Amino acid sequence: MTYRGWAEIAIVAVIIGLMIKPLGTYIFHVFEGEHTFLDPILGPVERFIFRFLSIDKDKEYKWTGYILRMIALDFAIIFFAYLIFRLQGHLPLNPAQAPGMRPDLAFNSAVSFGTNTNWQAYAGETQASNLSQMIVITTCMFTSVASGIVMAIAFMRGLSRRANPFLGNFYADFIRAILRILLPLALLFTLVLIPLGVPQTLKGPARVLTLEGEQQEIARGPVATLEAIKHIGNNGGGFFNANSAHPYENPSPVSNIILILLMLLVPASMIYVLGLYLQNRRQGWVIFAAIVLLFIIFAGLTMWFESRASPILEETGVDVTAGNMEGKETRYGVDDSALFGASTTSAATGSVNSSHDSYTPLGGMILIGCMMLNTVLGSSGAGLINILIYIIFTVFLAGLMVGRTPEFTGKKIESREVRLGVIALLIHPLCILGFTTLSLAIPSARNAILNSGPHGITEMAYAFTSATANNGSAFGGLAVSSAYFNVTTGVAMLIGRYAIFIPILAVAGSLAEKQILPESEGTFRTDTPLFAGLLIGIIIIIGALTFFPVLALGPLAEHFALFG
């Protein structure tokens, strides 16, 4: 790892720290219906949409009504996406003549983009038409992240309200998230990316004459619009199969840093929004500091592990002074690739600018570890929900250890909240480890692994971790285009999203009905550096106890076999 790598981590952390206050304040004003500087432009549009759809923005719902409307809308979008993928061969805007997808592939793709996972079991530029790219993929990149954002907003309302079981109006929140937050950000950064060399066109493939005199087709399309929302919304599905390693998606180190900032911007800002809802900005900054410290540690470790190449290459006399360059673009190098990898797995984005399968064993372990924890920033909205699960446990365990009242922001944490939190916490590892174990036990699924030994175990575990964490990045080295993997990863995506949203929103409904208790001598303060340290410790300890066995069988075993 070089000084340049540490400098890039510091630059990213500082810029994000400076940007979360204005964006977080804007997000808070949007969802509370307060005045913003975009009201003259977007206010009339919002009111028209509410009237056209007969939405009463002042009507609020309890947690059950809120989550049911969210699930109903999401599943309707997933079904619509499935139909488009199946029928795209008979629909317009298909200059490359992409045929309709197989049923299992269409199911996997529809669920993937509908759940903010954006796992791609297909080649983007050849198996998806321009219509599918725009009306399904790009649209779902707005709708799926909007659902995650409003879930976090509903939870924050539950924390902040006094004896009020209502969490807001899902439809009003959903429209505001898209219209007032995601669309302006996507438009702004589309205009930033186009001058950097990201194409934006509805034309078909460009036909060029190579230096050898051969004809070649170069795929192109509305890439810039997709690229902007892909990273702002922590989506990850690329226009091209090579994703952000493709020069049309990520042309230079400058665009690379911009895309990293876009991945982290909204998730980090949501933590500041939490402080505003709690009327305790210090609380928001303490949680932000804890999560950013975790990110810096994991990003630094990834760079460090990738700074040394395989000893096999050293023995052959290959120049390895640049570190482990296998699977990485020379225009980024080790540091930029490792920082991008740590960012995309920390923020549950899933876009990649290098082959994670080619990382060193410990470098790959950090990437899969970020998704297993699923709290190092996490995706927009959904990531904050995962952080809040760990906060509840930290408060509860701290209360047991020091004899203080288990409270968070004046709300007492009781057995109901802890039980629901345990359910939400266990679903994630049960889904990952269950599907990984099942797949390793089935010969046909095991045969899809292209590398034997510990590396093959890592490939299998990474696939289901990525799906369950709604990340979408691919480790590589695993042939996942079969019906078995399309169905199982699709089911893992659904479980990883909705089976966690339901119990955690039930926690929000329970907390919303409680009064805020005045602070007393028995209250354990949660806006202090001590609490930040406890939160980091709880996250790491629970993650290690849960996932150490599979990590020991996979990347750790491979590391000792390779470097021992």
Image (tube, grey):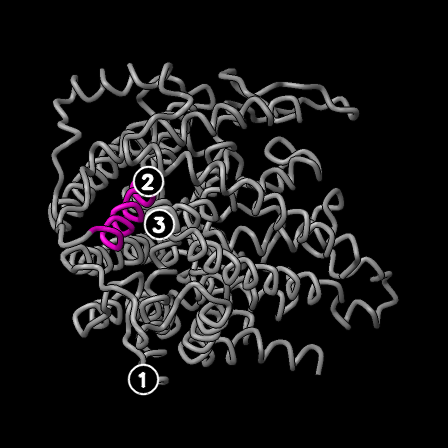
Q: Amino acid at mark 3?
A: Gln
Which circle, 1 or 2, is nearer the viewer?
1
In percent of the image, x 50 and y 60: which residue is there? 291
Point out which mark residue 144 bears. Answer: 2
Point out which mark residue 279 bears. Answer: 3
Give coordinates of residue 340: x percent, y percent: 61, 50
Is residue 549 one of those drawn in magenta? no
Is residue 316 rendered to the left or right of residue 192?
Answer: right
Q: Residues within 10 Å of mark 2 (few under 14, many from 20)?
A: many
Upstream in sequence: badge 3 or badge 1: 3
Upstream in sequence: badge 1 or badge 2: 2
Point out which mark residue 394 bears. Answer: none
The residue lying toward the viewer, choosing from 26 and 263, is 26
Secondary structure of the residue carrying tag 3 is loop
- Residue 429 figure quarter: bottom left
The residue lying toward the viewer, choosing from 267 and 127, is 267
Q: Looking at the rendering, in which quadrant would you find the N terminus? A: bottom right
Give coordinates of residue 151: x percent, y percent: 27, 47
In percent of the image, x 21 and y 51: which residue is there? 161
Upstream in sequence: badge 2 or badge 3: 2
Secondary structure, magenta segment, majority class: helix
Is residue 160 one of those drawn in magenta? yes
The residue that disc 1 covers is 403
Q: Amino acid at mark 2?
A: Ser
Q: Tell me the magenta residue range.
A: 147-161
Q: Looking at the rendering, in which quadrant would you find the C terminus? A: bottom right
> Is residue 267 positioned above or below 190 on the image?
below
Secondary structure of the residue carrying tag 1 is loop
Query: Do the CB atoms of the residues marked 2 and 3 lie less than 8 Å apart?
Result: no
Would residue 522 be visible to someone looking at this image?
yes
